[in-house]
Image (tube, rainbow, N blue to C red):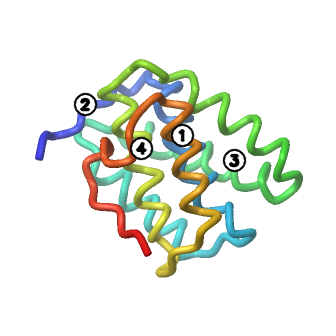
Amino acid sequence: MNEPPEISANSDATLRAIAAAYAYVACADGSYDHRESSRFEGLLKELPGLAQESMVRAQSYLSDFVRGFQLDFAEGLETAESAVHQLRGEKGLGQLVLRAAQVALISDGRLVQVEENALRRICEALDMEEGAGGGDVPHR
């Protein structure tokens, strides 16, 4: 498997897109719990070259996106899709975003159809195939 590209400390668009994709999939079923937050932190630690300050920013972005989904799902979706769409055509960075969505899909220990649908919409926003994130995504 290829290593994901390194993220610079100044890549706010990438960090926002990763947080947006993760929040979208994690919130698609109408709930969000501590397991999903913990797994996001673990995902960030796996990214090569991600500075501590960037991890803190990404976690803050995640909190903002989750809050947005909880307050008004349709508005949260619009905001998240806009953040993801910023990386359309950026294949290497798009793979990181897609990987985050794939991790979110299984982060709460269950597969739900609405989360799988959210993953498909993220793929469409990135103009990528589902398997492009580098992880095996379980299907029913």
The residue tagged 3 is 65
Identified at 74% across, 43% down, the residue is 77
Q: Earlier in the sequence, mark 1 or mark 4?
A: 1
Q: Earlier in the sequence, mark 1 or mark 2?
A: 2
The residue tagged 2 is 6
Report the number of numbered marks: 4
Pinpoint residue 18: horizontal percent, then vertical percent. 49, 41
* Distance from the alpha carbon under mark 1 to that under mark 2: 16 Å
28 over 131 or under it: above or below: below
Q: Nearer the viewer, residue 105 or 55?
A: 105
In the orientation shown, which residue stands out farthest toward the left?
A: 1
Q: Secondary structure at mark 3?
A: helix
Task: Report the amino acid beneath label 2.
Answer: Glu
Looking at the rendered image, the disc whose residue lies closer to the viewer, 1 or 2, is 2
Task: Report the amino acid beneath label 3.
Answer: Phe
Which class describes the residues within 10 Å of circle 2: few (<14), some (14-19), or many (20+)?
A: few
Q: Earlier in the sequence, mark 4 or mark 2?
A: 2
Marker disc for residue 98: 4
Marker disc for residue 121: none
The residue tagged 1 is 57
Task: Report the amino acid beneath label 4.
Answer: Leu
Identified at 36% across, 29% down, the residue is 93
Pinpoint residue 17: horizontal percent, then vertical percent. 53, 35
Q: Earlier in the sequence, mark 2 or mark 3?
A: 2
Q: Nearer the viewer, residue 66 or 95?
A: 95
Q: Earlier in the sequence, mark 3 or mark 4?
A: 3
Q: Secondary structure at mark 1?
A: helix
Left or right position of 16 against 39: right
